[in-house]
Image: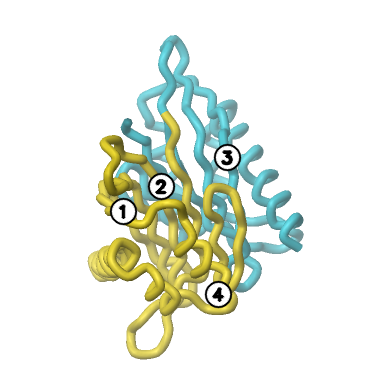
Chain colours: A yellow, B cyan
């Protein structure tokens, strides 16, 4: 069971950052009207506003490199996933270290949506 | 409502790290048999094992200094809280940067317990 949770968490993380780095508008499919994103302390709710925020971030091209993924079962079939990694922006040498958490809620057919999403850059 | 969530998150965080820094065995009161802690990738379940892990950490005295607290409502009255900060060990000059998340579940009388706890040091 633990292993299954880890596999689901990793599969979600791979999917999420692949979309973020290659087709950012498609991230809208992972949120619901009840979803909340807190991005660097700025709280945003609902699919449209969250998607607009993610698309408007001031870098056109980026690549997420994942360092760690920790997954745990939450309640009622949900999963919490905690990620650390770095964000590489196109044309820039240095990387931005970040931490992010997702609370995933099950839908039909084994899919999950993001109920909670909190992102923070790690300042040294 | 948002403000209430932020207040509850901050009150929990203050209480948690105060206990951690001053009376670590008392942290057991904040966990339940269903609770899971992932500490630097090591997964531990249940009140006794989590408390034993926290007590056995290789520093007797420490002080948590909090940089950011982000709180969001999860499901059924729960709250997810994401913290960044630094850990100052007694007798050491440098600080260890960390990120941590808690998923808090309501109990009677307005109290919460920790269902999910994930801790990671931030390596530069």
Pointer 1: residues within 10 angstroms few (<14), some, or many (20+)? some
Q: Where is residue A32 in the image (x, y as percent from the top left)?
A: 52, 78
Q: Distance between the residues labelled 2 and 1?
A: 16 Å
Q: Quick one: B74 or B112, which is closer to the camera?
A: B74
Chain letter of the residue beneath label 2 in the structure image? A
Contact check, label 4 and label 2, Cβ < 8 Å: no
Q: Is mark 1 on a helix, strand or loop?
A: strand
Residue A48, given in percent of the width and then of the height, sits at 55, 75
Residue receiving disc 1: A62
Rendered image quadrant of residue A3:
bottom left
Q: Dots 1 and 3: beta carbons under 8 Å?
A: no
Q: What element carries label 4?
A: helix
User: Which quadrant is the N terminus of chain B positioned in?
Assistant: bottom right
Q: How far apart are marks 3 and 4 (CA)?
A: 26 Å
Ranked by sequence position, the earlier of labels 4 and 1 is 4
**Closer to the camera: disc 4 or disc 2?**
4
Q: Is disc 4 in contact with disc 1, using a CB cutoff of under 8 Å? A: no
Q: Residue at x 43, y 70 (%)?
A: A104
Name which residue lies at 45% across and 75% down: A28
**What residue does disc 3 label?**
B68
- On the picture, is A33 further left or further right than A100? right
Q: From this viewpoint, is residue A12 visible?
A: yes
Closer to the chain start, of discs 2 and 1, is: 1
Quarter of the image where the C terminus of chain B is located: top left
């Amino acid at each position: 069971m633990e292993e299954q949770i880890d596999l689901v968490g990793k599969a979600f993380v791979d999917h999420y950052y692949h979309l973020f780095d290659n087709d950012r508008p498609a991230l809208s499919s992972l949120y619901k009207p009840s979803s909340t994103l807190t991005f660097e302390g700025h709280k945003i709710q609902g699919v449209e506003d969250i998607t607009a925020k993610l698309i408007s971030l001031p870098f056109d091209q980026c690549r997420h490199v994942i360092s760690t993924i920790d997954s745990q079962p939450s309640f009622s079939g949900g999963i919490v996933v905690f990620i650390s990694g770095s964000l590489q922006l196109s044309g820039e040498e240095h990387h931005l270290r970040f931490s992010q958490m997702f609370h995933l809620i099950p839908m039909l057919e084994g899919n999950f949506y993001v109920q909670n999403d909190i992102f923070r850059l790690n300042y040294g």
